[in-house]
């Protein structure tokens, strides 16, 4: 057998391919880094703008609240406000229960001569003509019958000659 002499070629390294590959990776890294930097700065700018917008909105709300408070403080009540309130109280006054309680009670010798409804005070004054005090007190007891607390009370009773008058008052609220 004969010896063979083989010469191996020196190992060739693809330097150009590696250099190109390295340059491509470096460019990709630079591009991704630049994009990330731009995204981060854009995000910071948006957050700063949102914070400044929130501060501006809070300032405007406070300014509007202050203007509304000043307008409410300086606004005078309309000239008709007192009359409108009186009309509203009169409309809300429970006239039917007052009249119903007066209509359901009848005592001989007691006659209703006048009814004055006072919505501002929340009550009613009734003027009565009566024959004797016993009938007047019986009338008052019948009016208050069934009430948890006496609603009707005697304000005054007077007699001048043959004519006797009394005023009773009720509170309705």
Image (cartoon, grey):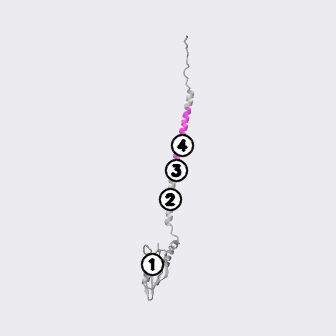
Of labels 3 and 1, earlier in sequence is: 3
Of labels 4 and 1, earlier in sequence is: 4
Estimate the spatial distance between the alpha carbons at disc 2 and disc 1, rounded to whole Å: 63 Å
The location of residue 104, given as percent across then percent down, is 49, 78
Of labels 2 and 3, earlier in sequence is: 3
12 and 101: which is toward the camera: 101
Kindly identify which numbered label has been placed on residue 142.
Answer: 1
Q: Is residue 13 above or below residue 136?
A: above
Of labels 4 and 3, earlier in sequence is: 4
44 and 135: which is toward the camera: 135
Q: Residues within 10 Å of mark 2 (few under 14, many from 20)?
A: few
Residue 70 forms part of the magenta stretch: no
Kindly identify which numbered label has been placed on residue 165.
Answer: none
Which marked residue is nearer to the observer: mark 3 or mark 1? 1
Which marked residue is nearer to the observer: mark 4 or mark 1? 1
Residue 46 forms part of the magenta stretch: yes
Q: Residues in magenta?
A: 23-47
Estimate the spatial distance between the alpha carbons at disc 4 and disc 1, rounded to whole Å: 89 Å
Q: Residue at x 51, y 51 (%)?
A: 52
140 and 171: which is toward the camera: 140
Judging by the rendered image, the residue that carries numbered circle 3 is: 50
Image quadrant in which the N terminus is located: top right
Of labels 2 and 4, earlier in sequence is: 4
54 and 163: which is toward the camera: 163
Which marked residue is nearer to the observer: mark 2 or mark 3? 3
């Amino acid at each position: 057998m004969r010896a063979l002499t083989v010469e191996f070629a020196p190992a060739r390294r693809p330097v150009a391919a590696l250099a190109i590959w390295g340059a491509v990776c470096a460019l990709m890294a630079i591009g991704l880094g630049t994009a990330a930097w731009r995204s981060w700065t854009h995000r910071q700018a948006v957050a700063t703008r949102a914070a400044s917008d929130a501060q501006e909105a809070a300032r405007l709300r406070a300014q509007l609240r202050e203007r509304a408070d000043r307008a409410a403080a300086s606004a005078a009540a309309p000239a008709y406000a007192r009359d409108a309130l009186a009309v509203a109280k009169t409309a809300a006054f429970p006239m039917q229960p007052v009249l119903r309680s007066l209509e359901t009670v009848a005592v001989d010798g007691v006659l209703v001569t006048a009814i004055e409804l006072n919505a501002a005070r929340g009550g009613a004054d009734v003027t009565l003509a009566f024959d004797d005090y016993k009938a007047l007190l019986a009338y008052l007891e019948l009016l208050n019958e069934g009430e948890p607390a006496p609603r009707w009370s005697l304000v005054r009773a007077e007699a001048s000659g043959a004519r006797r008058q009394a005023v009773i008052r009720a509170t309705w609220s």
